[in-house]
Amino acid sequence: MNYVLKSSIHSKKMSLPMKTLIVFVACVFLAHLFFPQVIPSLASSIVSPFFKAQKEVLVGSFIPSEQAQNLLLEEALRENEELKKGLGRTTTSRTTLAYILKKPPFTLYDSYIIDIGKDFNTRVGNKVYAPGGILLGEVAHVDTHSSRVKLYSSSGEKFDVFIGEKNIEAEATGRGGGLFEVIIPRDVHVVEGDIVRVPRISGGVFGRVEAITLDASRSFSSVIFAQPVNIYEQNWVLVEEGNERVEETQETATTTSKK
Amino acid sequence: MKTTPFIRLCAFLLSSILFLYAPWWVFWISVIAFLFYFPTYYEILVWGLVYDSVYGISSAGFGYFPYVCTAVGSILFLCAYILKKHLSVYE
């Protein structure tokens, strides 16, 4: 009698696709652990010529939208009055013009790929503005000749804002597509059309309140605001170099020294 | 299903063009279609990794995980592998 060994009945070798999958996942994990920039740099260097070729064909104009211009004019007049009563501090910021190589819906996330990188001294965290000075997001990843910009309207992104003339401080959450949501107590007085600002010295207009949702059963209200620029229509952005610099005017320095 | 190297090459070229110039959902629909057309479509693993390398950012919506498309590609590959074992059209 021949007895078939138990192990030979139930032995199953792992198939090639499964082995490939496991090896692939392990390689990605090890590459991320020891060489996190190799694969992104290599991939970006391969696709950059194709994006730049597309840019040569599709270069657009650098004009702020009419809505953005009007909103900025209102805010500039208000800020001018406040600054006249202030201490005469001025700000300077240097920016670099960048062309958007890829934008939503071509990108999966609310993000841009722009055509400046380490070659223009771009760094992670540099703020990015639409034409006219509307803050859009910040640089999230820098390659040699391009960078990826994470828009603040990306779903789940949180940051502090001031709402209205009373500068009501709140935390805004991105909802995607250029929209934001703020949850504030119901008793706080916010109306549609209030300007939303980010904590900055020089204005920092961010958006305008579009809708307010009140729920009688809850003690909070939901404020939806949008930026005055369409993130899907932008072709150019301004990338801030380093941090905003604050300088005192000579008059203020003289006044301070006399005291 | 019979697939020749020429068809595979055409699929790769089409995927490359869609990756560079088409919206993300067009690209991923085509890749998923190829995943089920070819008996074993290893390229989806590479496309996921390349997509994250070129377009990926650590977004709060995905818990700041930097390899979302790589994970999605791997899961799709695994699901397709398991599903194909039970479909006679792939025998």
Image (spheres, coloured by chain):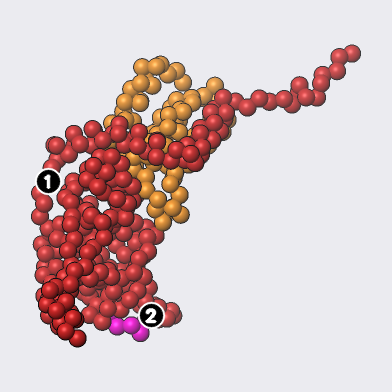
Chain colours: A red, B orange
Residue A144 vs residue B39, the one in the foreground? A144
Amino acid type at circle 1 is Gly
Q: What is the secondary structure assignment of the residue under circle 2?
A: strand
Residue A160 vs residue A35, the one in the foreground? A35
Instruction: Write the start and end of the magenta stretch as one range.
Output: A185-191
* Residue that appears at 28% across and 70% down: A199
* Residue that appears at 68% across and 25% down: A12
Q: Say few, some or many: other residues with alpha carbon within 10 Å of mark 2 (under 14 / 14 to 19 / 20 or more).
A: few
Sequence-wise, the earlier of marks 2 and 1 is 1
Query: Could you tell me residue A257's position as x and y percent?
Result: 18, 81
Q: Chain of mark 2?
A: A
Question: Splitting the image into 4 quarters, where does residue A188 fall?
Answer: bottom left
Residue A100 vs residue A90, the one in the foreground? A90
- Circle 2 is placed at which residue position? A185
* Residue that appears at 45% across and 30% down: B36
Question: Splitting the image into 4 quarters, where does residue A166 fall?
Answer: bottom left
The outermost residue toward the top is A1
Q: Share a chain, discs 2 and 1?
A: yes
A126 w.r.t. A160: above or below: above
| Residue A211 shows in the view | no
Query: Could you tell me residue A217's position as x and y percent?
Result: 44, 80
Amino acid type at circle 2 is Pro
Query: Could you tell me residue B85's position as x and y percent?
Result: 57, 29
* Residue that appears at 32% across and 51% down: A124
Question: Could you say which disc has been placed on residue A60 in the image?
Answer: 1
User: Which secondary structure is most common in the magenta stretch?
Assistant: loop
Q: What is the secondary structure assignment of the residue under circle 1?
A: loop
Let me know if residue A190 is in the magenta part: yes
